[in-house]
Image: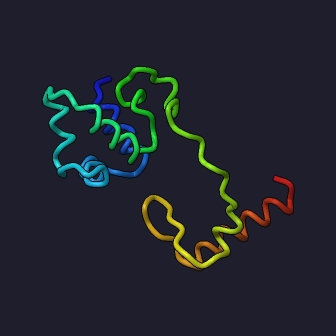
Amino acid sequence: MTTFERIKQTADERGLNLKQTALKAGLSENALYRYNQGVKPKFATVKAVADVLDVSTDHLLDNNINEMHANKKIADPVDLAKVLSEEGVAVFNGQPLSKEYKNALLAVLNTMKDTGK
């Protein structure tokens, strides 16, 4: 699989298209398509794309395909109950969750906790 194909596949898995991925990485909207035409990406570009997609550069470059997050720092735990019950923006697939949706998710999590599942 080429670097372009790995970027495209990973972006698809994240709910992004290549244009969105490029723009979030600070690139021109068609920048990533050049890599499908034989242009070799610069490391700084791969790093920016990897950060947007939350994967390691090794994953995109196929240096270690089995360790998708090998170079990524493990994030601090997030208390979902706190995030879902407080004011502020919570997002899913890049879209903000409404207060009603956050409350519904919190109710589902509480029900699962209470039933031991």
Q: Position of residue 15 (x, y in %)?
A: 40, 51
Residue pictured at 35% horizontal, 38% vertical: 47
The residue under the point 79% across, 65% down is: 111
Quadrant housing the N terminus: top left
Residue 20 picture quarter: bottom left
Question: Whole-percent x and y of residue 12?
Answer: 37, 45
Residue 97 spot, x, y in % from top left: 52, 71
**Which is nearer the eye, 17 or 31?**
31
- Name the quadrant containing residue 82: bottom right
When the figure is inspected, residue 3 is found, relative to residue 100, above or below; the finding is: above
> Colour scheme in the image?
rainbow
Q: Residue at x 54, y 68 (%)?
A: 90
- Depicted 49 relative to depicted 65: above or below: below
Give the left or right position of residue 107, taking residue 58 as reference: right
How many badges with numbers are in the image? 0
In this view, which residue lies farthest toward the top? 63
Residue 113 drawn at (x, y percent): 82, 60
Residue lying farthest to the front in this orientation: 44
x 31%, y 39%: residue: 8
Relative side of 36 to 53, left or right? left
Between residue 108 and residue 90, name the one nearer to us: 90
Dividing the picture into quarters, in which one does residue 84 lie? Answer: bottom right
Residue 41 versus residue 111 in the image, above or below: above
